[in-house]
């Protein structure tokens, strides 16, 4: 089982992006609420949280299932993206605690580093460049480059295959329940750093550890 893997045997660390590296989930929630309200719909935190970790196509399915087939998903999503872009342009992007220190630490190790995010490549690369960390990673795979969304393991398995690493020797860092489930289905070790979602007792059986920040992950790995 991945849960019994020794840290010393790791080959790869895979980072999620939104909610894990950047404090962007709350921005997305605010933007979804505003865009939906402008079209006469209400998106509460329960509905929004059900989409965390999902790519655009999966998010579309969840919203259409909740509302109905006439829900103007594309119009609302495009407006949401404009709102998010405006908010980030005006306020910048908030970096999660310990991100830079974690990446600098990993540079001193033999471990390969990757990003596996459910967001689109255009947006994902844009945010990574804005934070000045796009060159830290050996591989970046985005939600519009895979067929199936988290909690399906496709995105994580493709990263491991691309980098020639064994799934059972890969560590996934995630904030979302869907991401933790995907890592579990991939047979990978995972650490959950909750953002807008707290794990229930069932989810807690799927990950290796729960930590408060990437700073804690870096300290944990450096002591092994």
Image (cartoon, rainbow, N blue to C red):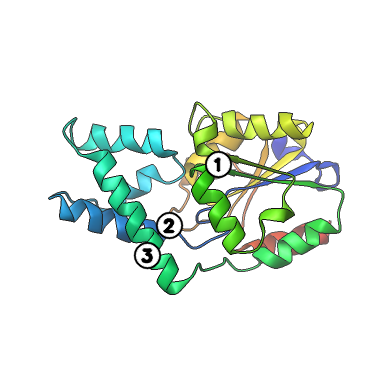
| Residue occupying the point 67% across, 59% down | 133
Earlier in the chain: of badge 3 and badge 2, it is 2
**Residue 47 shows up from this direction:** no
Foreground: disc 3 or disc 1: 3
Q: Which mark is residue 86?
A: 3
Q: In the rendering, at what x and y percent does residue 201 appear?
A: 48, 45
Quadrant of the frame with the N terminus: top right
Q: Are marks 3 and 2 in contact (CB under 8 Å)?
A: no
Q: Residues within 10 Å of mark 3 (few under 14, many from 20)?
A: few
Residue identified by numbered label 1? 180
Q: Is residue 103 above or below residue 209?
A: below
Q: Is residue 103 above or below residue 146?
A: below
Real-space CA distance between mark 2 and mark 1, rounded to the nearest whole angstrom = 16 Å
Q: Quadrant of residue 167?
A: top right
Drawn side of residue 50 relative to residue 106, left or right = left
User: Which sits in the foreground, 25 or 207?
Assistant: 25
* Secondary structure category for the residue under label 1: helix
User: Which sits in the foreground, 74 or 165?
Assistant: 74
Q: In the rendering, at what x and y percent does residue 82 appear?
A: 34, 56
Q: Residues within 10 Å of mark 2 (few under 14, many from 20)?
A: some
Foreground: disc 3 or disc 2: 3
Q: Quadrant of residue 129?
A: bottom right
| Residue occupying the point 55% across, 35% down | 182
Quadrant of the frame with the C terminus: bottom right
Earlier in the chain: of badge 3 and badge 1, it is 3
Drawn side of residue 82 relative to residue 221, left or right = left
Residue identified by numbered label 2? 25
Q: Is residue 194 above or below residue 188?
A: below
């Amino acid at each position: 089982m991945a849960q019994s893997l020794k840290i010393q045997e790791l080959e790869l660390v895979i980072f999620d992006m939104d909610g894990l590296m950047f404090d962007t989930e709350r921005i997305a929630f605010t933007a979804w609420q505003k865009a939906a309200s402008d079209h006469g719909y209400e998106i509460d935190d329960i509905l929004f949280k059900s989409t965390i970790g999902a790519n655009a196509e999966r998010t579309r399915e969840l919203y259409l299932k909740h509302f109905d087939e006439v829900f103007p998903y594309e119009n609302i999503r495009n407006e949401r993206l404009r709102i998010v872009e405006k908010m980030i342009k005006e306020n910048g992007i908030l970096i999660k605690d310990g991100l830079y220190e974690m990446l600098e630490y990993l540079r001193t190790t033999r471990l390969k580093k990757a990003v596996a995010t459910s967001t689109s490549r255009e947006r994902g690369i844009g945010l990574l460049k804005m934070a000045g960390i796009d060159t830290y990673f050996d591989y970046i795979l985005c939600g519009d480059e895979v067929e199936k969304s988290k909690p399906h393991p496709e995105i994580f398995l493709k990263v491991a295959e691309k980098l020639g690493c064994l799934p059972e020797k890969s560590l996934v860092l995630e904030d979302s329940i869907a991401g933790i489930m995907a890592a579990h289905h991939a047979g990978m070790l995972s650490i959950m750093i909750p953002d807008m979602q707290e794990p229930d007792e069932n989810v807690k059986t799927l990950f290796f550890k729960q930590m408060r920040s990437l700073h804690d992950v870096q300290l944990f790995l450096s002591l092994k």
